[in-house]
Amino acid sequence: MKEIFVTVDGMALDFDTARDIARTLALKMNPHTDEMAWFNRRANQFSPSGIMCRFGDTPGWEQYGKTHGGQRKISVNSGEYVFIFT
């Protein structure tokens, strides 16, 4: 999986803005991309939310993204928000 790291300084960053940034980048690489999983460290929320287990060091939501076609992991502000796209 390709990992992309994005840092935004100089403005408050909420989940929706981080998602928009990540999606814009993902669409540049694949115009037919889909979001497979995400993590919001600030709110301690993730999707899919029903996967509470870990696979070694990998959280369940991330493993789900990887095993369901995830090709790009976009981490915003040092993992404050993480998105996995096809």
Image (spheres, rainbow, N blue to C red):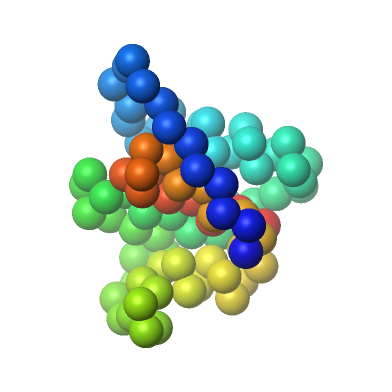
Hey, which quadrant is residue 86 in on the image? Answer: bottom right
What residue appears at the point 70 percent right and 49 percent down from the top-left corner? 33
The residue positioned 49% from the left and 50% from the top of the image is: 83
> Which residue is pictured at 40% across the width and 60% down the height?
47
Q: From the viewer's side, name the closer residue of 58 and 53.
A: 58
Question: Where's residue 30, x and y in %?
Answer: 76, 46
Q: Which residue, as the protein is rendered here, is positioned at the far left?
A: 43
Question: Dividing the image into 4 quarters, which one contains the N terminus?
Answer: bottom right
Q: Does 35 sit above or below residue 56? A: above
| Residue 82, horizontal then vertical, whole percent | 43, 50
The image quadrant of residue 42 is top left
Q: Position of residue 24 (x, y in %)?
A: 62, 33
Residue drawn where x is 57% and y is 70% of the image: 66
Most distant residue in the right direction = 31
Observer able to see residue 72: yes
Place residue 52 in its image quadrant.
Answer: bottom left
Residue 45 drawn at (x, y percent): 28, 55
User: Compared to 42, does 46 lie above or below?
Assistant: below
Can the viewer see residue 51 in this picture?
A: no
Does residue 53 appear to the left or right of 36 in the view shown? left
